[in-house]
Image (cartoon, rainbow, N blue to C red):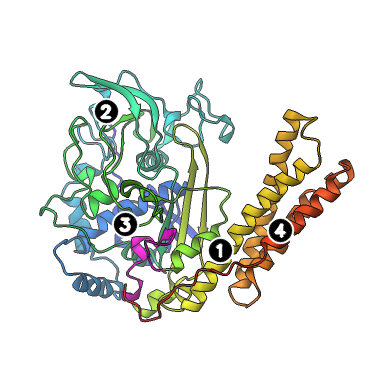
Amino acid sequence: MPPPSYRIDLRPCIPVRCGKHIEYVGLRALLADAHRIDDLALPLPPAQSALYRVLTAICAPITDLDDPDQPIKDWLEHRVELLRRADGFDTEAVHAYFDADPDAFDLFHPARPWWQDAALAVQCSKRSGINSLVYGRAAGRNLVWFNPRHTDTDPQPVPVREALWNLLTYHFYGPSGRATTRTVDGVSSGQLQAGPLRSTVSFHPRGRTLYETLLLHQAPYRGEDQAPGSDACPWEQPAADPLQVPPEATWPRRLLTGRTRHAALLVPDESGEHVTDAYLTWATQHPPLEATDPYLVYDINPAAPAERRRSPRRADADYAKFRALSALALAGDEHRPGCRPEAFTTINSLPGETRASLRVWVCGFDQEGQVNNRIWYTSLTPPIWPLAQENDPVKASRIVECCAAAETLGAALRQAADQAWKDTGLTRRRKGGGKREASLWAGQALADYWPRAEQAFWQLVDDTRPAYGVFAAAAIRALSETTRDALNRLPQAGPALARAAQSLRRAGTAPDDTLRPTGGPHAQP
């Protein structure tokens, strides 16, 4: 019986959306037909965010958008020409890319499995277990209630295409901490560093077709000179030596796909249709490569040391999605708390019809640093270009004002809810219970507040009502609704909640220094 083989460029392993239908295609068909595909449709959002980066890296050489010596003006003009093509990517270029090294896309190749290290079968002390790869399954110390049907005592095989999605997620969002021990040339370790996207939130430009989306994901080179031929994806070169210092994050392929901290090796069954186990361990013990991911918002702290001044915005499941619009609406400014992702800095160069329909798919993965994955979340914005600072500075200013008001009143609501509980006087008599219920009051009030705030936000963007006052009203309503039962149970709840409402009314007074951006519709990228 021949050894298992699974060519991801040929096998239907990627779900895509075409109209109302979901189809499965290999990477070749996906790129060749990208102009007829609406979007990716992976059921694992972090894997979709990872795959956007992989596909963008592959498309760069296919479209000749990977020349670091090309003047930015010529690069932008070439991308516009590609965006105006009705027949999508050059199919000959697509097939030429995969035909150049077809073995590189075999998930189970004995020597060069795609984005894996075959040496792990010898270098690892044991297998890690399939449950450690598949997100949502119980393994080790992670949370069991995500998928209680799968346990360490009875690990079930996973279809290969699902293993592929989880492999993508592992490379980008994998944990830090303890992993399977790997020994290389006498160096033995079982310690991992977190993946490059762990606990982050990504902002992906989305066009009318997948073809347009992948071109919108391309970003021009703005770094220092890099050696010709130095840029490559992991599967385009021999397996890296884990003891050597990784090469710098060259643009665009190594930047997008070459910063993984993790190594993996899938173990298939005899048929090659399922993955039964995996080796999961470290790929390098060296410090992370310095790089700016083009789909992340970087928060700026001017008071911090230079090496820690910029940091990717962390994913937060309690974070209302509309709050990200302030970073997208404004052009980059090192004095503001958030910078627009680099993938959006060339919006002005896009054709008018492309700009008008540009939306943003937001994908966050709220995770702890080591084992636990809290939850992932997604959101799709309306077309954002009409709201951007370059096109409508007044509307962009209003978005920033509304986001700031929502943030301010959310923080005020948390403080007011906690203080109201303390003011009941029961905390002193119910130490443990009082502390827990104080958190419950604030948590429930905020859970009620943010949906109200999002509804208010979209109304406020198009009217002139004072934003702070509207969000104060939403906060008061949320506090009232979630503490209604307490008024009947706790004698001091009435006065305490009245004082809390009064504090929220005071917080609803707009500050004098509301941020207003400068610039106009003809600002340059």
Residue 197 lies, with reference to residue 94, above or below; the image says above
- Residue 75's label in the rendered image is none
State how far apart marks 3 and 4 are (Cα): 56 Å
Would you say residue 336 sits in the magenta stretch? yes
Say whether disc 2 or disc 1 marks the residue closer to the N-terminus: 2
Looking at the image, residue 233 sits to the left or right of residue 414; the answer is left
Q: Which residue is mark 1?
A: 403
What stretch of residues is rendered in magenta?
A: 331-350
Say whether disc 3 or disc 4 marks the residue closer to the N-terminus: 3
Rendered image quadrant of residue 87? bottom left
Task: Give the residue displayed 31% in from the left and 37% down from the top.
Answer: 261
Q: Which residue is mark 3?
A: 29
State how far apart marks 3 and 2 are (Cα): 29 Å
In this view, the mark in front (3 or 1): 1
- Residue 504's label in the rendered image is 4
State how far apart marks 2 and 4 are (Cα): 72 Å
